[in-house]
Amino acid sequence: MPKKSDSAFASRIYALLRQVPAGYVTTYGDLAQAAGSHAYRAVGQVLRCNPYAPEVPCHRVVASDGSLHGFNGSRAATSLQRKKSLLSQEGLSFQKNKVLNFSQHRWSFRQL
DNA sequence: CTCGTGACTTACG
DNA sequence: ACGTAAGCCACGA
């Protein structure tokens, strides 16, 4: 549940992300649009300060091309490695830092 | 209110 | 494929 200290925008992002089932990923763009805005970057800021660590799996959010950018407030390769591991456990496949069959595992809020 | 910043995206050379 | 530039929105100082 959203905290009062969270912005309405942030809450929306969290709520949407929570809808994403395991084995699926989404992009910042789609997330933003689903939130009713085009604040791609704002989404990044929100996730970076993600106070709902396990409940809001920020690792299910990838770049528009399915590549893993940052994670856990870090762009370090170690973080990306962990991200890959987590997603791998959810049935996703990886090639370096990119998701295989990305479009296939990509979650679309618009279809809901 | 203004300014700077960012885990972004798209376009261009 | 890669670097740069511009556009974009929200948030904290």
Image (cartoon, coloured by chain):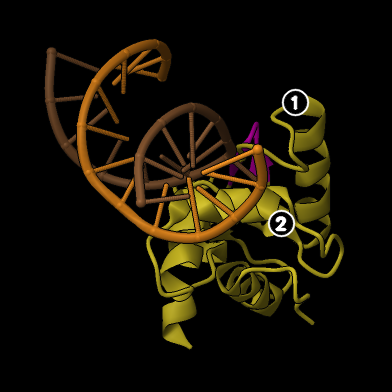
Chain colours: A yellow, B brown, C orange
Q: Quadrant of residue C7?
A: top left
**Is residue A80 at least partly visible in the picture?**
yes
Q: Nearer the viewer, residue B10 or A38?
A: A38
The residue sitting at 69% across, 29% down in the picture is A75
Residue labelled with disc 2: A58
Compared to A100, does B4 lie above or below? above
Which amino acid type is shown beneath numbered disc 2?
A: Cys
The residue sitting at 51% across, 65% down in the picture is A31
Q: Quadrant of residue A43?
A: bottom right
Q: Around disc 2, counting alpha carbons within 10 Å, would you say few (fewer than 14), some (14 to 19), or many (20 or more)?
A: many
The residue sitting at 53% across, 64% down in the picture is A106
The residue sitting at 80% across, 35% down in the picture is A79
Circle number at residue A76: 1
**Magenta-tinted stretch:** A94-99
Circle number at residue A95: none
Mark 1 vs mark 2: tell me if same chain. yes
Left or right of C10 on screen, residue A25: right
Which amino acid type is shown beneath numbered disc 1?
A: Ala
Secondary structure under badge 2?
A: helix
Compared to A61, does A13 lie above or below? below
Compared to A35, does A81 lie above or below? above
Which quarter of the figure is the N terminus of chain A placed in? bottom right
Secondary structure under badge 1?
A: loop
**Subunit bearing disc 1:** A
Give yes or no for residue A66 being in the magenta stretch. no
Q: Mark 1 vs mark 2: which is more N-terminal?
A: 2
Give yes or no for residue A96 being in the magenta stretch. yes
Where residue A8 sits in the image (x, y, percent)?
A: 58, 74
